[in-house]
């Protein structure tokens, strides 16, 4: 089936979204009011220049910067990936090594590997025993699953007091502080750089992200790299969706959200589904007696699409319900109440045993979440392969595995 037909089929099927993007098939907010093919313009006079903004895009950045005092903002059309890689390039000019705290996305490893920098993965506690003078610490908070790094503000302050720099990958946190009932935005932790994917939880188009930087000179250095890496034909639809999401963020009222969330949790429990609430109220982790992989498949068979499934559970990204949204909430409850276990089949595992003890030649990454399992240059252990098998049996996509197999079968070159 062609891509267009495939996309159409999801509409006909009436798929219910429990995944990103945050507009949930245009049912949260009403992006279609501002996203029209006729607005798909380019940088003609009057529409400014994304990489040297001085008119309407400068105004948009100024509006975005109001999200948190003391930050410069830049709208981006190539996702948080673009912001992270560009920030690593800019900070690499100032530091001699990087520390990584938390489960970092592959873009962090890609950035560090491109600049050929040294890095160490540490825990937040180990920060206090580390030499930070000429370092940059990269945090991921919230994690994909909605958990936050505890006491991050104190960690950042400690890093700054010890002359280090900090980046927070807050890809999953653009909606935090949307009201006082949500956890605090990572912008309040005062890191040097914070990058947020607006598209993940707010009503913005996929790839809509925002870079926030404290210091203007650092901001300009990051802009220098963004100018190198980001497309020179930015989508005005993506940019308009960032403005739309910012407006939504400013005006949001959470009354309906928390009521619907409570009804949903009740309904899930009635269906004998265990619900683990996360720091982020817009994330839920679910499982049931037959295990998380079976639960995800059972939902999918009824047309409810989840964000991710791991051994921990099925991850749902809740819609930011609001007055007047058109999210199919009743249909969702109905589908949950009628949920029956799907018949699962095992995925195939081919030729991975050849990799035991070999040096990994391309990062091995379960996707989602996109957090590397084995990094290039490290030995692939029996334990790693057990994890890979387990994922593959459960139909989780593993990036890089085939490349490693091909390489060691002499069918691929580095
Ligand atoms: C923790 C984390 N950081 C960064 C990214 C990349 O964000 P984007 O898709 O906006 O490039 C992701 C994407 O899933 C992510 O999970």
Image (cartoon, grey):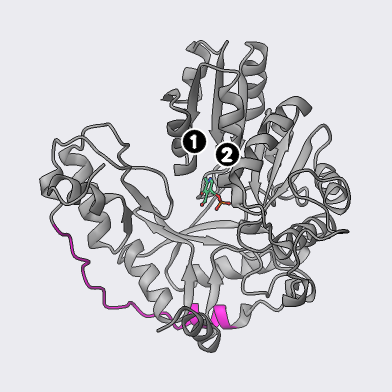
Residue 332 image-quadrant placement: bottom right
Name the residue carrying label 2.
84
Q: Quadrant of the C terminus?
A: top left
Ligand 1 closer than 8 Å to label 2 CB: yes
Extreme residue toward the bottom, this view: 12
* Residue 110 picture location, percent across and down: 45, 39
Question: Along the polypeptide, which appears first: circle 1 or circle 2?
Answer: 2
Q: Name the residue nearer the viewer: 118 or 413.
A: 413
* Residue at the spot 77% in from the left edge and 62% down from the top edge: 240
Tally the numbered discs.
2
Say which mark, if any, is on residue 378: none
Residue 151 in view = no
SS for dot 1 = helix
Give the overall secondary structure of the magenta segment. Answer: loop
* Magenta stretch contains residue 59: no
> What stretch of residues is rendered in magenta?
331-350
Left or right: 225 in relation to 276: right
Crowding near the residue tagged with mark 2, few <14, some 14–19, many ≥20 C-alpha atoms within 10 Å: many
Left or right: 165 in relation to 33: left
**3D distance between C-alphas at marks 1 and 2:** 7 Å
User: Do callouts 1 and 2 mark residues in contact (Cβ within 8 Å)?
Assistant: yes
Say which mark, if any, is on residue 111: 1
Residue 206 in view = yes
* Magenta stretch contains residue 343: yes
Q: Name the residue nearer the viewer: 57 or 331.
A: 57
Judge whether 15 appears above or below 355 on screen.
below
Q: Name the residue nearer the viewer: 212 or 129.
A: 212
């Amino acid at each position: 089936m062609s891509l267009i037909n495939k996309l159409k089929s999801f509409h006909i099927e009436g798929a219910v979204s429990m995944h990103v993007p945050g507009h949930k098939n245009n049912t949260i907010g009403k992006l279609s009011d501002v996203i029209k093919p006729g607005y798909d313009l380019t940088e003609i006079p009057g529409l400014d220049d994304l990489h040297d903004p001085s008119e309407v895009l400068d105004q948009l950045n100024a509006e975005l910067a109001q999200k948190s005092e003391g930050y410069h903002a830049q709208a981006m059309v190539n996702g948080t990936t673009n912001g992270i890689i560009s920030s690593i390039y800019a900070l690499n000019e100032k530091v001699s090594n990087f520390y990584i705290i938390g489960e970092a996305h592959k873009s962090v490893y890609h950035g560090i590997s491109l600049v050929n920098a040294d890095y160490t993965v540490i825990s937040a506690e180990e920060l206090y025993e580390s030499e930070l003078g000429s370092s940059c610490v990269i945090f991921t908070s919230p994690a994909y699953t909605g958990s936050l790094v505890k006491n991050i503000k104190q960690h950042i302050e400690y890093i700054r007091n010890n002359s280090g720099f900090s980046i927070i990958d807050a890809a999953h946190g653009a909606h935090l502080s949307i009201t006082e009932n949500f956890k605090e935005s990572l912008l309040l932790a005062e890191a040097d750089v914070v990058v947020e994917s607006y598209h993940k939880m707010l009503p913005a188009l996929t790839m809509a992200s925002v870079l926030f930087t404290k210091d203007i000179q650092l901001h300009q250095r990051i802009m220098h790299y963004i100018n190198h890496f980001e497309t020179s034909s930015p989508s005005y639809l993506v940019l308009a969706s960032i403005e739309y999401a910012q407006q939504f963020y400013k005006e949001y009222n959470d009354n309906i959200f928390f009521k619907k969330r409570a009804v949903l949790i009740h309904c899930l429990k009635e269906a004998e589904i265990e619900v683990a609430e996360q720091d982020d109220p817009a994330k839920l982790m679910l499982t049931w007696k037959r295990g998380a992989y079976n639960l995800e498949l059972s939902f999918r068979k009824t047309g409810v699409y989840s964000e991710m499934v791991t051994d921990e559970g099925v991850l749902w990204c809740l819609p930011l319900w609001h007055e007047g949204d058109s999210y199919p909430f009743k249909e969702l409850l109905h589908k949950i109440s009628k949920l029956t276990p799907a018949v699962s089949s095992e995925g195939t595992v081919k030729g991975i045993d050849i990799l035991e003890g070999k040096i990994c030649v391309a990062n091995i990454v379960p996707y989602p979440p996109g957090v590397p399992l084995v990094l290039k240059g490290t030995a692939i252990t029996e334990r790693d392969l057990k994890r890979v098998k387990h994922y593959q049996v459960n139909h989780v996509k593993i990036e890089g595995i085939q490349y490693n197999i091909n390489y060691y079968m002499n069918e691929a070159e580095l």
